[in-house]
């Protein structure tokens, strides 16, 4: 409902990137640039300094950004007050998720949510856990679901569910017949790792350190940016890896991979993260409750041995 020019400017100011703003707003970059220039024409001053392929807010831009934040909060409060009176749940939510969660947990969750609340629009940003937390800290997204602990005390952090990690090897691998293996085997064989900043990689490295393994001796055959890529590399015999048990159900059913329990079990939290806010939109509360209930139900079904 707020001025479109101001919305576009605010997104560019948050990301300090016309390209990223265009992606988030589902606009072309020229359209974003046009909206910002219109606002600059309105104020008759530059709002961004553009030098060496980088942009920064001018003093005027800083002032507009501060006031825009308050304006959007007031708009959200007004809309939420009306929706509370009418019982309507609608609006736009900016959701972020780490790769594993976005690929294996969110499709069915968001599908079920949209079936109940069809007027809610959810825009999903997918990245590794570190980047998702940074997006929340910088007000780029409203809510994040990540696969690693979050230690920022300025954020609200709720554990959704625990996720079991397993050693994953090709079916013809020397370890494939083992039922249980020590985490240290990741040092003994070529290893397929997730990229820096990934929650999966962080958990793996912390477990190896706790076991006293020498990280300098890890033979990292490949670093890949998604669980699907890691599984493909392991299936191809390029190495072994540590993955979430939730990500390999299809491969276990097809018998293209073997999952081995670890001698010292490793679990990590799937964590819901958002900023502490005096005011929160009704639609965000509904999604938070929905995610929590979804995770509780998933935990109950797992204990009963029921597959989703």
Image (tube, rainbow, N blue to C red):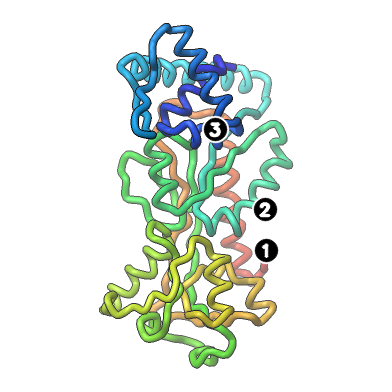
Q: Residues within 10 Å of mark 1 (few under 14, many from 20)?
A: few
Q: Out of 144 and 45, give the one closest to the viewer.
A: 45
Q: Out of 212 and 9, give the one closest to the viewer.
A: 9
According to the picture, the residue beneath numbered tag 3 turns out to be 22
Badge number at residue 41: none
According to the picture, the residue beneath numbered tag 1 turns out to be 308
| Residue ranking furthest to the front | 52
According to the picture, the residue beneath numbered tag 2 turns out to be 108
Residue 63 placement: quadrant: top left
In the displayed structure, 88 sits above or below 121; it is above
Q: Nearer the viewer, mark 2 or mark 3?
A: 3
Q: Position of residue 101 (x, y in %)?
A: 54, 56
Image quarter where the N terminus lies is: top right
Residue 54 placement: quadrant: top left
Q: Give the SS element for disc 2.
A: helix
Q: Are marks 1 and 2 in contact (CB under 8 Å)?
A: yes
Q: Earlier in the sequence, mark 3 or mark 1?
A: 3
Q: Give the SS element for disc 3.
A: helix
Q: Earlier in the sequence, mark 1 or mark 2?
A: 2
Q: Residue at x 61, y 22 (%)?
A: 84
Q: Is residue 8 visible in the rendered structure shown here?
A: yes
């Amino acid at each position: 409902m707020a001025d479109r020019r101001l919305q576009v400017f605010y997104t560019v100011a948050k990301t300090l990137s016309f390209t990223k703003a265009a992606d988030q707003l589902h606009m072309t970059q020229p359209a974003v640039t046009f909206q910002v220039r219109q606002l600059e024409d309105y104020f008759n001053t530059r709002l961004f300094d553009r030098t060496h392929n980088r942009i920064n807010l001018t003093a005027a831009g800083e002032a507009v950004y501060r006031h825009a934040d308050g304006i959007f909060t007031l708009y959200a409060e007004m809309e939420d007050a009306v929706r509370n009176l009418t019982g309507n749940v609608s609006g736009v939510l900016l959701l972020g998720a780490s790769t594993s969660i976005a690929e294996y947990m969110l499709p069915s969750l968001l599908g079920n949510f949209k079936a109940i609340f069809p007027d809610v629009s959810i825009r999903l940003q997918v990245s590794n856990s570190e980047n998702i937390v940074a997006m929340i800290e910088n007000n780029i997204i409203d809510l994040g679901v990540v696969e690693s602990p979050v230690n920022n005390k300025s954020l609200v952090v709720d554990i959704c569910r625990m996720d079991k990690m397993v050693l994953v090897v090709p079916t013809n691998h020397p370890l494939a017949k083992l039922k249980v293996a020590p985490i240290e085997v990741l040092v003994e064989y070529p290893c397929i790792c997730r990229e820096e900043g990934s929650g999966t990689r962080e958990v793996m490295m912390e477990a190896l350190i706790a076991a006293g393994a020498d990280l300098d001796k890890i033979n990292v055959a490949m670093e890949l940016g998604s669980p699907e890529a890691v599984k493909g590399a392991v299936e191809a015999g390029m190495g072994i890896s540590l993955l979430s048990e939730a990500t390999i159900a299809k491969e276990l059913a097809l018998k293209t991979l073997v999952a081995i329990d670890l001698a010292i079990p490793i679990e990590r939290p799937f964590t819901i993260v958002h900023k502490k806010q005096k005011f929160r939109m009704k639609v965000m509360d509904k999604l938070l409750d929905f995610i929590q209930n979804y995770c509780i139900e998933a935990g109950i079904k797992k204990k009963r041995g029921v597959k989703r």
